[in-house]
Amino acid sequence: MTSRDVNPLADDLDLVLTHTKGLWEELRGQKIFITGGTGFFGVWLLESFVWANEHLNLKAEALVLTRDIEKFAQKSPQLAKKSCLRFIAGDIRDFAFPSEQFAFVIHAATDASAKLNDENPLLMLATVVEGTRRALDFAVHCGAKKFLLASSGAVYGSQPQDLVHVPEEFSGGPNQSDPRSAYGEGKRMAELLCAIYAKQIGIEAKIARCFAFVGPHLPLDSHFAIGNFIRDAMSGGPILIKGDGTPERSYLYAADLA
């Protein structure tokens, strides 16, 4: 039995590999450290990493920071048992630095929770900002060549009615007098931290502003509208739309994200 026979994401992972094949050589024989590796983004990154590692015989390893190793093993047993993946438990804000060298650090850990953002904006802000600072400090400590921050489209704030598409250089931002802006403002500060570390310390920091996704592993019981729509459709409806039905949104498929 091959990996294709047991992995329902095989076609998607082939797509990822086809479009990124020339990039993986840089990781051959290297170690990568990933925070947030057990969330929606993280699982897709791990699936893609394992697929490329096995198909290209990279002999690379990934160490994944997670708050609950056992919970992840129950949710994703196919990843938990992979020999190229190791897991350490810890909080992104104060995790103990592993005593290893890593060539790359991917920082994808954050609480993308509307409930937390509404009920405890201080904790949301601290998790995003302090967590990014901790991840950057570790990247410097372990001698990483490159650092990737998974940021968010929330850094742009509310989209003006006359703006059909938000350009990357759009200078708008969240309302800093509204506590509900904790997540967006936190991501803006996280991006600024990356820029400061890049200039002051020299680490090659990269930022991906991510928003609006759909695909396997997306939670159906969270605040993601399309996940709720899929859940409601699977249960026979009705599909609840909290709005007047006029807004339009495009979604990026998870394999294209990876």
Image (cartoon, rainbow, N blue to C red):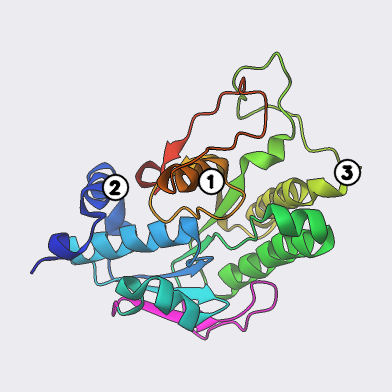
Please identify the quarter of the rendering in which residue 133 is found. bottom right
Disc 2 to disc 1: CB gap under 8 Å: no
- Left or right of 96 on screen, residue 37: left
Task: Residue 220 in the image: state x and y as whole percent.
Answer: 50, 53
Give the CA distance from mark 3 to mark 1.
26 Å
Q: Evaluate whether residue 4 shows in this view.
A: yes
The answer for how far apart the CA atoms under marks 2 and 3 are is: 39 Å
For mark 3, give the secondary structure: loop
Name which quarter of the figure residue 86 lies in: bottom left
| Residue at the spot of label 1 | 228
Would you name the residue on which mark 3 appears? Answer: 178
Q: Say which residue label 2 marks.
A: 16
Give the magenta-colored segment's residue range.
82-101
Q: Earlier in the sequence, mark 3 or mark 1?
A: 3
Q: In the image, 110: left or right of 14?
A: right
Q: Residue at x 55, y 59 (%)?
A: 108
Is 90 one of the magenta-colored residues? yes
Q: Amino acid at mark 3?
A: Asp
Where residue 72 appears, as percent x and y from the top left, is 46, 75
Task: Quarter of the image for the N terminus: give it.
Answer: bottom left
Front position among marks 2 and 1: 1
